[in-house]
Amino acid sequence: MFIGAQVSLYPMTSDFVGVITAGLEALAPHRDRLRVETDDMSTLMVGPPDALFDAIRDLFAGAARGPAHVTLHATISRGCPGEPDDPACRCETLAQAQTQALSERQALAHGAVQDATVLGVGIDVQFSLYAMGEGRHMDEIYGCIAFLKTSGTFQRSKNFCTRLRGDAGPVFETLHQAFLRFGPAQGHVTLDLTASANSPGLR
Amino acid sequence: MFIGAQVSLYPMTSDFVGVITAGLEALAPHRDRLRVETDDMSTLMVGPPDALFDAIRDLFAGAARGPAHVTLHATISRGCPGEPDDPACRCETLAQAQTQALSERQALAHGAVQDATVLGVGIDVQFSLYAMGEGRHMDEIYGCIAFLKTSGTFQRSKNFCTRLRGDAGPVFETLHQAFLRFGPAQGHVTLDLTASANSPGLR
């Protein structure tokens, strides 16, 4: 399986280059578990889901600690049939999920969010989860939405996406669990993620 | 069918509120064909695909004419089973696509891009197209990629997405055609879009 993301950080300040450069430094502790390549539009990260979500969380939480309004967008993917298999992306949780009922996966997802480390940074998120290549994809999506609504980070449903709000630790763990535990375990699942912090619209 | 988008504009300048406010004025000519609602994270637009892509194009092209580095993200969706049917979203092109072979749809898509109005604004785009709810979704994706590579706006393939580059007119027409002509005509198709202009990384 191939797992990774294209990630972009958007600081709404004239010093955006400085904020982005500092943000990329937050990836340093994760570089031994991820392949990281940056171009003019986004940073590619390839590796196992736990390292991937921790890295995106730390990149965004670091930027969100500053005063600037900052947003992040990530296109996160697992199991795309067009990508090569990569042993570095191996994930035990996904291997186990193949034999777990939806209710069991929901309970495991709840436990992981409850155990998430609190970082002391409040963020807003909206995202869409897409499960492809099987006729019953909406059953998994509705199962995921049921988890989200009781996750403690749910804010509201919107057209085409779901809003989360809270500390960056539990919010990113909610995203991590949604991506890992729902949709076909060996299939093609993607997550379209937008995060926001320090928005003047919320002051 | 329900068709629409969640759209966000990100100007990388301390005057981001001014750029966003001016950008939203570019939507004025499209408001009679679209339902438009803005919150602190994104602007919802609901309506037929031609109005939708023209509105997003004009929003972004207007902001890209300024000096600031600006990006836009949109989550665009048609046929989501979780959304209500809306007669205002009716699209003749989608109705016709049900009986058209892949090769015919590719030819129609090429013609539309060749006829697109040139706006005089150069932009970069990267996007992912997702077709859900059927086993053979990759056939449609590969058919779309074949169209993209000969569209005249193709820049390169990346992991998880495709890069386009060129004038905002043909580039947005390429996205419009990818969204309309590929994937199941009455099924659930989404597009995860990032646009960028005036990036210092390209100067």
Image (cartoon, coloured by chain):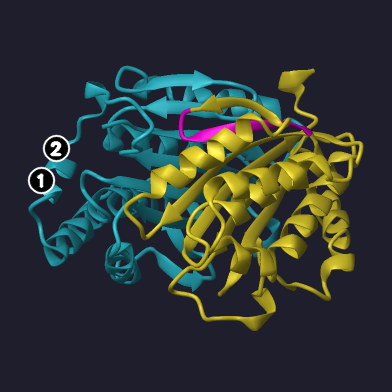
Chain colours: A yellow, B cyan
Horizontal and vertical percent for residue A28? Answer: 88, 67
Question: Residue B11: which quarter of the image?
Answer: top right
Determine whether B33 is above or below A198 in the image: above
Furthest toward the left, the residue is: B99
Which residue is labeled 1 in the image?
A: B96
Mark 2 secondary-structure assignment: helix
Residue A160 belongs to the span the image colors magenta: yes
Query: How crowded is the residue under tag 2: few (<14 C-alpha within 10 Å), some, or many (20+)?
Result: few
Q: Is residue A148 above or below residue B46?
A: below
Q: CA distance from mark 2 to mark 1?
A: 6 Å
- The numbered mark at residue A118 is none
How many other residues sit within 10 Å of disc 1, few (<14), some (14-19) or many (≥20)?
A: few
Amino acid under disc 1: Gln
Q: Magenta span has B152?
A: no
Indicate the position of residue B81 as horizontal and vertical percent values: 34, 36
Residue B167 x/y as whole percent: 41, 54
Tell me the kind of residue under disc 2.
Glu
Nearest the viewer among A194 and B199 is: A194
The residue tagged 2 is B92
